[in-house]
Image (cartoon, grey):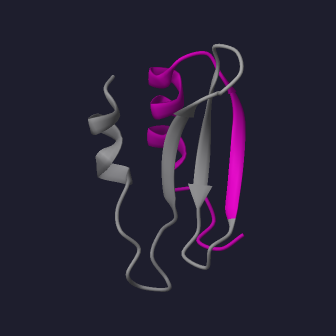
């Protein structure tokens, strides 16, 4: 699954009450992937432990509605 597929869940955060932005990134060391959850207020949360980009994107798809709007 390409990164573009996740673009449905990735949007510019113009309003304070909008959903957080979630994006997959490859780990700098090793071969794993992680998801960064960026909140409108500037806070970030990192979710580790994905073996591939598609696994990270699948997690975003499955959990996008359950991530809190604010940390």
The image position of residue 52, as x and y in percent, is: 53, 17
49 vs 57, left or right, is right
Asked which quadrant contains residue 38, the reply is bottom right
Q: Residue at x 30, y 47 (%)?
A: 7
Note whether 8 is above or below 33 in the view shown. below
> Looking at the image, which is closer to me, 17 or 41?
41
Q: In which quarter of the image is the N terminus?
A: top left
The image position of residue 41, as x and y in percent, is: 61, 79
Asked which quadrant contains residue 70, the reply is bottom right
> Number of marks in the image?
0
> Looking at the image, which is closer to me, 38 or 29?
29
Q: In which quarter of the image is the C terminus?
A: bottom right
Q: Which residue is drawn at 37% across and 81% down?
A: 14
The image position of residue 44, as x and y in percent, is: 67, 61
The image position of residue 35, as x and y in percent, is: 59, 40
The residues colored magenta run 44-71
Q: Does the magenta stretch include residue 60?
A: yes
61 vs 7, left or right, is right
> Looking at the image, which is closer to me, 65 or 24?
24
Report the residue that reaches farthest toward the front: 28
Q: Residue at x 47, y 30 (%)?
A: 58
Q: Residue at x 37, y 54 (%)?
A: 10
Note whether 35 is above or below 17 in the view shown. above
Q: Is residue 57 magenta?
A: yes
């Amino acid at each position: 699954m390409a990164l573009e597929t996740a673009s449905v869940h990735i949007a510019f955060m113009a309003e304070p009450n909008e959903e957080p932005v979630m994006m997959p990134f490859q780990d700098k060391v090793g071969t794993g992937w992680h998801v960064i959850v960026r909140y409108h207020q500037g806070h970030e949360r990192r979710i580790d432990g994905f073996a591939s980009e598609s696994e990270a994107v699948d997690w975003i798809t499955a959990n996008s509605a359950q991530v809190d709007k604010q940390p």
